[in-house]
Amino acid sequence: MVEKTLIQRYVQIFIVVSVYWFVSITLVFVNKSLLSGGEKLDAPLFVTCYQCIVTVAACYVLRFLARLIPDKVEFPDLSLDINIMKQVLPLSIVFVGMITFNNLCLKHVGISFYYIGRSLTTVFNVLMTFFILGQKTSLAAIACCGVIVGGFYLGVDQEDAAGSFSLSGTLYGILASLFVSLFAIYTKKVLPVVDGNIWSLTFYNNVNACILFLPLMLIFDEFSVLVQFEHKTSLQFWIMMTIGGVFGFAIGYVTGLQIKVTSPLTHNISGTAKAAAQTVLATYWFSEIKSAWWWFSNAVVLLGSAAFALVRQKEMAIAQALKTNSSKVDSEIQNKV
């Protein structure tokens, strides 16, 4: 009976990790097709805004299902509170920057280089954690960041040598990495506003984003681009746009689910392995020939990222053990007193 339960757990982990890989990789390929494919729309802000609209719609669908079958689906109330919207606004501004620069990076670089282009997220996490939260990082973790920076530099150099380097795409990737790290920090600060409910935060964040994108699209004249877009009546285009939105919504859920059935460390390792698989798949799909040094740069970044995850996991485990022992000592002292 125990063996069967263990097998069921492994099967569950395999299914969840596989779904995470499928959703994440598919989302990248769909967005790449929308931003620079055959029916590309040269309006990245509109594409991103539409995906936010789909996310809001998906929240309402799940809320409806929660009312219809409450024993199977749980979802928080979605009544809009202006006060909460205002408190979530700083996070929403960071969120808009994050997904905008993320898509702009994907628009200007190939999928094979996409991971390298956004590989500095870990480095910015360390920097932002120090400058904003005042938390220091160990030398071992900093050394891992140094490895990542080295891999990033080598990857840029090799991309340039191959003649496919995009300065704008790389800069967008760096900015996307910065905003991803800021988003993680601000999420922790804003979560108490919605009582720690990540779905409520997702809902308010995307509602705010939809509003914030409107003036940005006006400033960058994307409405006229949309009017002149020759495929705007194409059913295939809108299906792809909607799929991108649905997968954009789903990635948040499957990420949380993967962490839940495994662990944060396993999630980071899975994400690193997924990035490697995505890079290999992209080079095969687009028939790209890369040099040995280019592949080496990817390996350096991947190993640096995996090592950082392992180092941080050990440090957190040690910190937790020290905290537990301290609590036990305090409890024994109180009992003696």
Image (cartoon, rainbow, N blue to C red):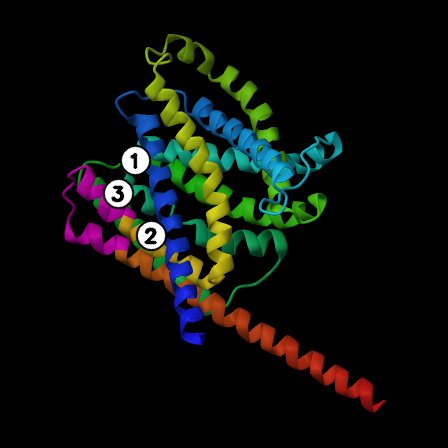
Q: Residue 185, position in %: x, y?
A: 58, 49
Q: Tell me how far mark 3 sits from mark 2, CA to CA.
A: 12 Å
Q: Amino acid at mark 1?
A: Val
Outermost residue, bottom side: 336
Residue 112, labelled with which disc? 3
Outermost residue, right side: 337
Vertical side of 52 occupied by 329: above or below: below
Residue at numbered disc 1: 109
For residue 6: magenta? no
Vertical side of 333 occupied by 64: above or below: above
Q: Residue at x 75, y 33 (%)?
A: 83
Q: Residue 91, position in %: x, y?
A: 61, 39
Nearest the camera: 22 or 170?
Answer: 22
Query: Toward which corner of the image does residue 118 lie, by quadrant?
Result: top left
Q: Amino acid at mark 3?
A: Ser
Q: Quadrant of the C terminus?
A: bottom right
Q: Residue 2, position in %: x, y?
A: 45, 75
Vertical side of 84 occupied by 317: above or below: below
Q: Tell me how far mark 1 sits from mark 2, CA to CA.
A: 18 Å
Q: Is residue 150 visible?
A: no
| Classed neighbour count for the residue bearing mark 2: other residues with Cα under 10 Å, few (<14), some (14–19), many (≥20) | some
Residue at numbered disc 2: 274
Outermost residue, front side: 1
| Secondary element at tag 3 | helix
Q: Quadrant of the N terminus?
A: bottom left
Per the rendered image, the range of residues in magenta is 278-298
